[in-house]
Every structure is written in C-alpha cells, then in structure tokens.
Amino acid sequence: MTPDDLARIHAACFTRPRPWSAAEFGALLHDPSVFLLTQPDAFLLGRIVLHEAELLTLATAPAARRQGHARALLQRFTDTASQRGAVWGFLEVAADNQPAQALYHGDGWQQAGVRPGYYAPGIDALILRKAL
C-alpha cells in the first residue's frame, strides 16, 4: 500500500483525532523502527523501540469490516514484534470506541492506564498492553 492508500483508509475510519496525511504516513514509513502490515483494505502500523512494540494505528475500510482483517493484523503484529525482540506491546484506544476495545480485549490486551482528555475534552485514551 502506498502512503496515499493508507491516508485514504485512515480518513474513512477516523475523524478524532484527525486522520493522518499521506505525507505523515510517508515519513513514518521511512523510519527504520516502523513496520507496516497489510490485509485487503486494512493495515496496521507499528513501531519497535528496544523491547517494546507500539501499535500506532490500525484501520479497516468500512466496506471491509467484520471479515477478520483486523484480528489477522493483530496476530501478525504480535508475531512481527516478537521476532524483532519486543516483549511488550502497547497501544492507545479511545475510551468511547467500544468495538475497538472489544477487538483488543479479545486478543489479550489489558488496560494499563488512562490518558485523560487525550482524544478530545472528555474523551480519554485507554492505554492497553499485552505480553508478547
């Protein structure tokens, strides 16, 4: 997928915080600590720093949802991060995004903290982690 493809899918999925631009995706993809995993009309962007893996974003185009793409990407994230030496995974998810929380909890992620008002006033980010 090109940075334009990533930006298109991201824009179809997110309004808060604002969707990332093709230029932002391009810059991230030039970072050697960042990796991209793809499925049809879905992607996951991750980053490895020392022994920690951060799931930066996961997006599935609305028409491709409920087909197992996100779940497959999460498994590949775990495998890829482990192979690259990470022992913990971290991510942030909006406290009002119940479908995403259900996906992550079903994959073994557990809440490790909260960032109050991270996404918008009154919308916290839940910090989730998973042993890899």
Image: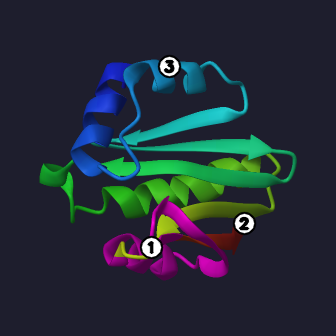
User: What residue appears at the point 50 percent right and 19 percent down from the top-left corner?
Assistant: 26
Task: Tell me if 15 is positioned left or right of 79 in this view.
Answer: left
Q: Residues within 10 Å of mark 3 (few under 14, many from 20)?
A: some
Check residue 71 for magenta coloring.
no
- Ranked by sequence position, the earlier of labels 2 and 3 is 3
What is the x, y in percent for residue 55? Answer: 59, 53
Q: Are marks 2 and 3 in contact (CB under 8 Å)?
A: no
The answer to whether 19 is drawn above or below residue 22 in the figure is below
Q: Residue 8's quadrant in the figure?
A: top left
Looking at the image, which is closer to me, 47 or 16? 16
Between marks 1 and 2 in the image, the one whose residue lies nearer the viewer: 1
Q: Secondary structure at mark 1?
A: loop
Q: Which residue is mark 3?
A: 26
Between marks 3 and 1 in the image, the one whose residue lies nearer the viewer: 1
The answer to whether 22 is drawn above or below residue 71 in the figure is above
Q: Secondary structure at mark 2?
A: loop
Separation of disc 3 and disc 1 at Cα?
31 Å
Check residue 115 for magenta coloring.
yes
Say which mark, if any, is on residue 122: 1
Residue type beneath disc 3: Gly
- In the image, the segment drawn in magenta is 98-124
What is the x, y in percent for residue 61? Answer: 22, 47
Q: Is residue 40 visible?
A: no
Q: Residues within 10 Å of mark 2 (few under 14, many from 20)?
A: some
Quadrant placement of the C terminus:
bottom right
Quadrant placement of the N terminus:
top left
Q: Is residue 94 visible?
A: yes
The answer to whether 113 is drawn above or below residue 12 in the figure is below
Residue type beneath disc 2: Leu
User: What residue appears at the point 57 percent right and 79 percent down from the top-left corner?
Assistant: 108
